[in-house]
Image (tube, rainbow, N blue to C red):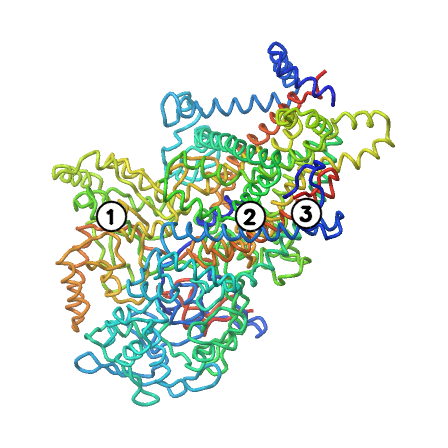
Amino acid sequence: MHLGVSIRALALATVFVVAACGGNQGGTGANPASPDKQILRVNVDTEPGTLDIVQQQWVYEADVGRNIYEALTRPKSDLSDVEPAAAKSWSVSSDGLTWTFKLRTDEKFSDGTAVTASDFVFAYKRIFDPTVAATYESYFEIIAGGSQYSSVDPKNATAVKAFLDGLGLSAPDAQTFQIKLSNPAPWFKWVTSLWLASPIKKADVDAAGSANYGAVTADAVSKIHGNGAFVISEVVPKDHITLVPSKNYRTQPKLQKVIFYYITDGNVEYAKFQNGELDITRGVPSPDVPTVLADPKLSKEVLRGPTLLNWWIDYNTTRAPLNNADLRLALSKSIDRDSYIKNVRKGIGIPATYFIPNGERGYAQSDIQKYDCSAAKQLLAKAKAAGVTDAQLNGLHYEYSASSARKSTAEFLQQQWQQCLGVNVTVDAVESKTHSRHFRTLDYWIGGVSGWNADYPDPQDWFDIFLTGSGNQFSGWTNKDYDGLVNKGDNSPNQADRDKAYGDAQKLLETQAPVMFFYQEQKFLLINSKVKGWNYSALDDDWIGDVGTALTMYIST
Amino acid sequence: MAVTAGAPRRRGALPFLSFIPQGRGTTLGIYIIKRLLWMIPVLFFVIVITFFLMHQAPGGPWDREGRQLSPAVIQNLNIKYGLDKPEWQQFLTYISGVIRFDFGDSLRSPGQHVSDLLLESWPYTFTLGALTFILLVPIGIGLGVIAALRQNSLVDYTALGLATAAASTPNFVVGIFLIILLAVGLNRVTGGTFYLATGGMPQPFNPFQPELIMPVITLGALPTAYIARLTRSSTLDTLRQDFVRTAWAKGLRARLVVMRHVLKNSLIPVVTALGPTFAFLITGSFIVETLFSIPGIGRTFVNSIAGRDYPLILGTTILYAVLIAVINLIVDVLYVFIDPRVRLTD
Amino acid sequence: MATAIGVAQQVDWDVAEQIGLWQDAWMRFRRNRLAVAGLVFIILMIVLAIGARLPTTPGGLWRILHLTGDPFQQDVTNTFAGPSLQHLLGTDVLGRDLLSRIFYGASISLSIGIIVQFLILVIGGSIGMAAGYFGGWIDNLLMRFTDIMYAFPDLLLVLVFVAAFGPSFWSIFIALGLVYWVGLARLVRGQVLSIKEKEFIEAARMTGTAPLKLIIKHLLPNSLGPVIVTLTFGIPAAIFTEAALSFLGIGIRPPEPSWGVMIEDGYAGIFADPQLVIFPGIAVALTMLSFTFVGDGLRDALDPRMRR
């Protein structure tokens, strides 16, 4: 009993890819219900580990962080650019290195104190503080002095202070926040829109102590003061967090309460929604999709939308026979993605043979990895001519991080490779941490499903993944041409040059196939028909309209 | 030590404690104290094994799927939590902390003490587990005795059928079927006027919450079935003893007299099983807590292992070890009361 | 009581009588209709399981006879299908024939269910017996050892086990046996303790006879009941644990099915397609029921007090 119960947990424990923020067009109006009914109940899957935004890293943490804080900028609803948020305007010097943000004068923390530039300096320094060890630190290393991060000894207080003071962060006056970069980086504007780059009240950190600040305890209500539209009104550890409007925010939302629940099990979430205990789900169990679409009531509450999340299968290019690019492409071209989406995922998702997701700058439909069994066979023959043996092929393993959904994916892939190429791949299910370790140490053959969810809609966020030595690629793939193209794209101030470089890099990636592009995620969730005023953006992750939307959302009569 | 046969040679307390007046109560007292002292080496070994095994488990707290941490951040996190030191040093630090009741900070929840996290969630688990236990003991034993007395009757077969169904249905299936029937189903049938909420446990210490109905059934179905089957089987065994058969033949009054004796005899294996059952219930079920959104310790524990949250794994294991040792002690003491022939000796 | 001792002693010394005992037991077992029905069902399941793998996998004999389909052949255009002539129980998430997967799964789940119980019986039984019989510090030591084992996070143990010994089908038996013996050990110990107190043992002790033999002889009929209950409840537990374990990489590899894994997978679609959980669930339930009947029948057959 005991064992069964505890081990099964791993099947249920899921890991998420983190993403950023958004706000698009959405639900239409009706009369709002009375204020006492303005309660929105949302599922964020897991309790946040911390309320210290700087240390937050997961979607379920950002869900809370984004609503109680406001960064300098936020993505425009069409994701074409960023727009002012806590900053009312900004300017970039002609060399692209100095970014000057002018803060809003009416920006306040939830306790009524004004937000000043020094609060931003404090927060940005906290991201770099090695004793805090904020996980998003690498996103900010483009800031002058940031690249020294890895050489600072956290136990040496003077060294830490010298490092933090040497960063290109300054507050010439209370309303001006200035950032100096080490390289011109046009995509840096997106980094300033990340929720964790919001002002933090130094007094809060000092009162709690840097190590204990942000603890998710009942008294966090009086310990955390953000500058967002909402403020924490209740923390019941492991059960829920309740937000209420912040009196000191410049506009007032109609919603009087937003409650975040932590429901991990998809079936339970689905039941709770049907039972009227939840207003928005995170998804629908895929076998239930046909039922939902056929149900007269539920089908009207479906929200279907694009996301900036792509899934792929990794090949370990450092291990024979997968060091052969033709073999990798052959394997990639023998998977019928259309059938997978239609039949296994019940139509949820977009078959993808491309890297940059549809809906983001840089997206380009591509046939290079397209399902084509005869072409795949030819490529396999070519690989065999180059020395790939049958014994090697039949020794291939496909490893995945265990869950029921990924199991049927693995079995589907196995059958497809068998059918098209006659290659018998052994399927290995392993526990998540083991899988991650195998990926990091390149101790596997084929593995998946891996994916990336855009932090912000700039191709830089994506192309950096496959740079030589990048921690986020698990293929051990090295290609000098690719590295050159991506560096050009990342640093060139001219948008057309960037597009061209990234486009060429994408083609190279698809041909060399260190990964097999598989499908683009789609949102398929249920939202109570009484909930109005929401916006949906492809950048939303856990619940629709992560950012900004809670401001406009309301419950209708 | 423990409970051993009552050979007349070593009755009573230890020789060097002979100044203590001898009697059953004193013996029991000393026995309990000795068993409690035994918990120290037990705990120590549990910590040692858990500590080194947990570091052997593949992957570490900072491994994850998807977006990776940079090596510099991992290095700083290791320094922050003392994971950069050699394992034996970490172990000594931990043990010296435990002696001072300091169980360290959770790796997943920065700034939170392990002891606070456990104190937060265990009340929920305990209330649910203890309530289930209090309900399942009379139901399980009652069903078992009735089934044994009416062997091969309809009652017997019904009890057997229920037991089989409960044991061969995993509890996540039991739970979701209950939700489908009592929550979603009732809601639809009654048009939303009467149904059970699918989860939550608003008050940690209150056993009288309608929210607990489904979790208690889900959690208790299997152990109740087990206890019922065990009671039935062991009662049947006792009923076959010669003295019982003779008494049985003598008529109703004798039966009543004997019944008490039968029960006492047949409850020995049941009491043995009740110990682990109680331990199982109050250490929390990950499945039940997940299905019914109960912020209990079962989830905490499983998530700590899945997340390699080392201090939380150790803290929960220590709590479990103490609970189990205490429960087993209680069971062993109960033997004395159920079976007077069993005596506590050194 | 006197009768009981007499029987036991005769068995020991008289081979002819021993044969008589087993014959007698078999006769009494045969009279128990439920026990026979259970035995027949178990044999049937074993035949079905063998037939699902022989003469050729996949599908085996049953596929050749067109009774079932191929347990591995996917037909993704026909997923979650209901029962039909072609697929008697319908199809699963990838359109595979459910009945053939249940038969194939029987071969895995039955062997796990039975072998693990055997391991538990050996480990738990001997530790419990030793603790109960020797008493004193041996008992104390063994029982504290069970305390440690019980408190110990089994999930961790298994994770490390897999890491150390690599994923293999046999490691599942060892892992399960290592984890589950504790309850049985305590149960057997309790039984030994209470038998030790019986008058005839005291008598034997006083006359200087080694009581161990007597205890074993009396332990068998006296505690067979609770032990059988524990072991039969262990069968579904082992089957479901195997399912959980296969997610860690021990146990069976996808796409091979076992009953536990089938239920686990079916859970994802329990609202829309509960049959994917119910059919393998019925297989587990019937198997457990059969073992219960056989176990009860065995106990009655082996109990000397029931002899006429």
The C terminus of chain B - image quarter:
top right
* Contact (Cβ within 8 Å) of mark 1 with mark 2: no
Q: Amino acid at mark 2?
A: Ile
The numbered mark, 2 or 3, whose residue comes first in the sequence reads: 3
Q: Secondary structure at mark 2?
A: helix
Q: Nearer the viewer, mark 1 or mark 2?
A: 1
Q: Position of residue A333 (x, y in %)?
A: 23, 44
Distance from disc 3 to disc 1, alpha carbons, whole Å, reads: 72 Å
Q: What residue is disc 3 on?
A: B15
Q: Position of residue A376 (x, y in %)?
A: 20, 41
Q: Position of residue B340 (x, y in %)?
A: 75, 40
Q: Amino acid at mark 1?
A: Tyr
Report how many numbered discs are placed on residues in the image. 3
* Foreground of the two, A496 or A415: A415
* Foreground of the two, B119 or A545: B119
Tag 2 and tag 3 share a subunit: yes
* Contact (Cβ within 8 Å) of mark 3 with mark 1: no
Q: Residue at x 39, y 50 (%)?
A: B57
Task: Tell me if I can see residue B191 in this picture.
Answer: no
Q: Quadrant of residue C200?
A: top right
Specify the subunit that label 2 lies on: B
Numbered badge on residue A315: 1
The N terminus of chain B - image quarter:
top right
Q: Quadrant of residue C212?
A: top right
* Foreground of the two, C185 or A262: C185
Specify the subunit that label 1 lies on: A
Task: Tell me if I can see residue A441 in this picture.
Answer: yes
Q: Amino acid at mark 3?
A: Pro
Specify the subunit that label 3 lies on: B
Q: What residue is disc 2 on?
A: B176
Distance from disc 2 to disc 3, alpha carbons, whole Å, reads: 59 Å
